[in-house]
Amino acid sequence: MGKIVAGIGSSHVPSIGRAYDQQKQTDPAWQPLFDGYEPVKRWLAEEVKADVVILVYNDHGTEFFLDCYPTFALGVADSYAVADEGYGKRPLPDFPGDAAFSEHLANHLVSDEFDLTLCQEMALDHGFLTAMPLLWDHDDTAWPVKVVPLLVNVIQHPLPTGQRCFKLGEAIRRAVEAYPEDTRVVVVGTGGLSHQLNGERFGHINEEWDKQWMQRIQDEPRELAALSHKEVMTEAGAEGGEVIMWFVMRGAMTERVEEVHRFYYAPMTTGIGLLALNNSD
């Protein structure tokens, strides 16, 4: 039987990937961030030992654009390419998929009344790529885990609600637990935290709200998911609304969770958060 063995919430910021590729892990401006991820990377490698990672992200105009942007899209391929976002392909190996597991997820989620766009090819941009090398070591050719990309529309209104994303996570847990193979699954929800990249509030960060978010998504996720997009974006900025993707991760966990590690850093135009959770129930 499949089992969800961890939930991770993580920001995705393109400049983190560039710093990683340029080996700035000990640069004074970047070292606190990279050091903040190390405890979770060790925990995932030494204790969690996942077989598959379902990573929830949004595409930034690389694979999908405003003329055709699905609400939810699921990768069902055997492998996924690293996208070129306009400044060259990052020096990361492509990602192995698990087509059989993805097909199982697709069948169960559609039966559970989630209408998905199913993708046999997906090039993955920084929405997906930021977290992976911070959480799992890799060599020049391979990753230690297989991946299932799950895209959520946080780009073009109408957006799915936080409650809908939470329910998608609950459906994912049911699907994983119905999988006949002994498969250890980590769900990663990416995005945010607070930031705004346009208009009069360009550069907006709300550190207090970010920290409350990371606590409330543990303790009272259903109440948090009931917030409207307007309420979230007023506090977190227009682009901060993408934090709804963390609800997919939280919905996939049990009602009660245990915090393994929490980290927050806000040196730039985005509040950067990392939250690692265990199931308690």
Image: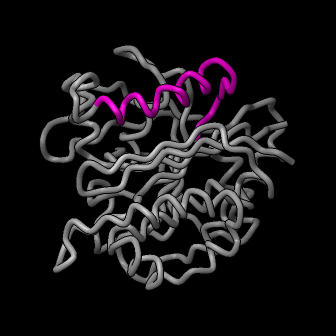
Q: Give 53 or 83, whichever is nearer the viewer.
A: 53
In the image: residue 181, left or right of residue 58: right
Q: Quadrant of residue 36?
A: top left
Q: Which residues are magenta?
A: 31-53
Determine the residue positioned at 39% across, 61% down. 207
- Does the stretch in magenta take in 52? yes
Number of numbered discs present? 0
Q: Give 231 or 176, whichever is nearer the viewer.
A: 231
In the image: residue 221, left or right of residue 238: right
Residue 69 spot, x, y in % from top left: 38, 69
Above or below: residue 10 compared with residue 165: above
Colour scheme of the rendered structure:
one colour
Residue 269 spot, x, y in % from top left: 24, 57
Above or below: residue 135 compared with residue 153: above
- Does the stretch in magenta take in 178? no
Determine the residue positioned at 53% across, 52% down. 189
Q: Quadrant of residue 16?
A: top left
Above or below: residue 263 compared with residue 234: above
Residue 30 spot, x, y in % from top left: 26, 33
Q: Is residue 76 visible?
A: no
Determine the residue positioned at 65% across, 28% down. 51
Determine the residue positioned at 30% across, 56% down. 270
Q: Give 256 or 122, whichever is nearer the viewer.
A: 256
Q: Is residue 206 visible?
A: yes
Q: Quadrant of residue 197?
A: bottom left
Q: Main secondary structure of the magenta part?
A: helix
Position of the N terminus by quadrant: top right
